[in-house]
Amino acid sequence: MPCDSGYEVEMANRLVAERRRFIKPLRLEAGDVMLPDFQLTDTRSPTAIEIYGMQGNHQYLARMKEKQALYARTIAPCVEWIPPADVASVLLPNRVT
């Protein structure tokens, strides 16, 4: 699976270890306005996972705020991880069986 950073590798490894169902979107599809780092597919509705690993970059922080506002407006479920917090500290929603 292609990952864009070491943090994405950490999250992908966690999702696999926990046997979660997820995808790694690689490009925007028709109608998409954002490209999450991962998307859980074993939840009631697809849940985005965003990893915000470049906290010192002003442009990156501006885009992070845009994404957070978009998620809030669309009421789309999103889990955020802001390293260097441990990946295990991220609370993932329960699976729907």
Image (cartoon, rainbow, N blue to C red):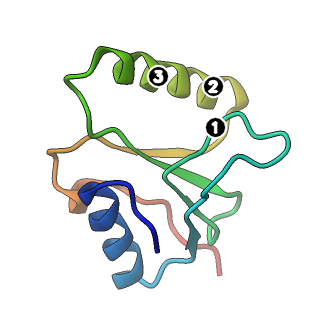
Q: Establish if 73 lies above or below 46.
A: above
The residue indicated by pointer 1 is 34
**Front in this rendered view, residue 96 or 67:** 67
Q: Position of residue 2 (x, y in %)?
A: 45, 68
Residue 70 is tagged as 2
Name the N-terminal-most of marks 1 and 3: 1
Q: Establish if 57 lies above or below 54.
A: above
Q: Are marks 1 and 2 in contact (CB under 8 Å)?
A: yes
Q: Amino acid at mark 1?
A: Met
Q: Are marks 1 and 3 in contact (CB under 8 Å)?
A: no
The residue indicated by pointer 3 is 63
State the residue lying farthest toward the right. 30
Residue 96 is tagged as none
Name the N-terminal-most of marks 3 and 2: 3
Q: Position of residue 25 (x, y in %)?
A: 61, 58
Name the N-terminal-most of marks 1 and 2: 1
**Which residue: 71% across, 33% down?**
33
Q: Position of residue 76 (x, y in %)?
A: 66, 40
